[in-house]
Image: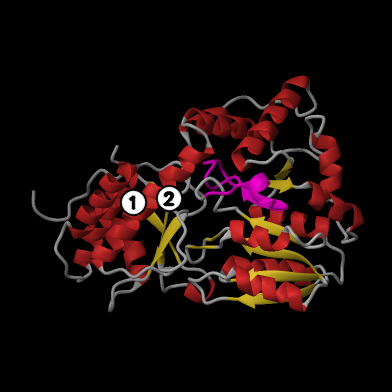
Amino acid sequence: MRGRAPMLKKSRLFTPGPTPLHPQVQEALSRPILHHRTEEFRALFKDCTAGLKRFLKTDGDVLVLACSGTGGMEAALVSVLSPGDAMLALVAGNFGERWAAIGRAHGMEVRTLEAEWGDAVAPARVEEALERDPRIRAVFVQLSESSTGAAHDIEALARVTRGRKDTLLVVDAISGAGAMRLETAAWAVDVVVVGSQKALALPPGLAFVSMSTRAWAAAEAARAPRFYFDLARERKAQAGGESAFTPAISSVVALRAALGSVESMGGVDALVRNAGVLAASTRAAAGALGLPLVAPRAHGDALTALYPPPGLDSGAIVKALKAEFASTVAGGQGKLKGRILRVAHLGYYDTTDILGLLASLEVVLHRLGHRFELGAGMAAAEAEYLRLTKD
């Protein structure tokens, strides 16, 4: 049949948050609600915190909060600093700017080290900044800067901070945990913030904050005003399998299912490897199709951010993918709004998902007038997949 007749379309989500829900998560969300002050819920909650420790590779406390990832960021900051403290925010995108904004809102003396959007702040620059200003109490950074697809070298940054007894390393790993390597304890990362709607394939609504012994020592001295986001209060409550306030009960039930799904596939390392293969395959396809990477030197694996080919509008590509294939990719944020598209690899995606999207992208680019050999992107992606998965 000729023409653009209506066709069956399955909606597919390729955004770096929210991400598709794992089927086990969907099933858990459908269960009758529990009461949160019962032994059944306390046992479930303790299972979740133990699983989160394995997920983040830490032997320290991991707290569960009913809030967005940004709420977790704010909770972390106000729990380790006091008004007037000097802090250093590494700004290489929209979410680096968010660390600085939260600090200013709470009266901190905010210093920034900036990199071009699409790049990362070099650890050597951080070391120099700390040498110049020993008053800095904490360095705030993103593992994955999801506005650009860039990644910071957390292992190298931790080597800079762990030798300074009064300087913490606080990492927003909201889009990075479960998609990129993160060794919280082994690297001596003091605070890690994670969100539920990313690699764990849960709905939005939960944040997780990992705290080291050094971070708790800082929390004892911190005097930033806080009530709901008082992590010391949460630590005391959660040691007994409860939260200080009403938890997001159904989301916590689903969290246990999500953590179980990660364990069943081989643990967080398997999830990270999955994202790495999908990301590398996508980058190979982008190169073959003439879509420049936003972060060519510092790319991470949680997502791939791409500029459109010359003469094409990124918004038109995003809209066409949605209209013809019911596939949703993300546009840009901040200064990159309307200039790029972003494809997620974190969480519940497999090779067929990404290969299908790349084939759809080829069709859309061709319809919009970008000329290339059809199948070039697919061939490059398949070759990279075969290279990375050969025995």
Q: Is residue 228 visible?
A: no
Q: Is residue 17 left or right of residue 373?
A: right
Q: Amino acid at mark 1?
A: Ala
Q: Secondary structure beneath disc 1?
A: loop
Check if residue 253 falls in the magenta segment: no
Between tags 2 and 1, which lies in front? 2
**Most distant residue in the front direction:** 163
Q: Which residue is mark 2?
A: 345
Return the x and y of residue 346 as percentages of the image width and height. 47, 48
Q: Residue at x 87, y 68 (%)?
A: 83
The quadrant where residue 324 appears: bottom left
Q: Residues within 10 Å of mark 1 (few under 14, many from 20)?
A: some
Q: Which residue is mark 1?
A: 326
Viewer-side residue, 117 vs 249: 117
Q: Is residue 175 above or below residue 32?
A: below
Range covered by the magenta-colored residues: 181-205
Q: Is residue 264 above or below residue 367?
A: above
Q: Secondary structure beneath disc 2?
A: loop
Q: Is residue 383 left or right of residue 79?
A: left
Q: Main secondary structure of the magenta part?
A: loop
Q: Amino acid at mark 2?
A: His
Q: Is residue 91 left or right of residue 323?
A: right
Return the x and y of residue 220 as percentages of the image width and height. 90, 52
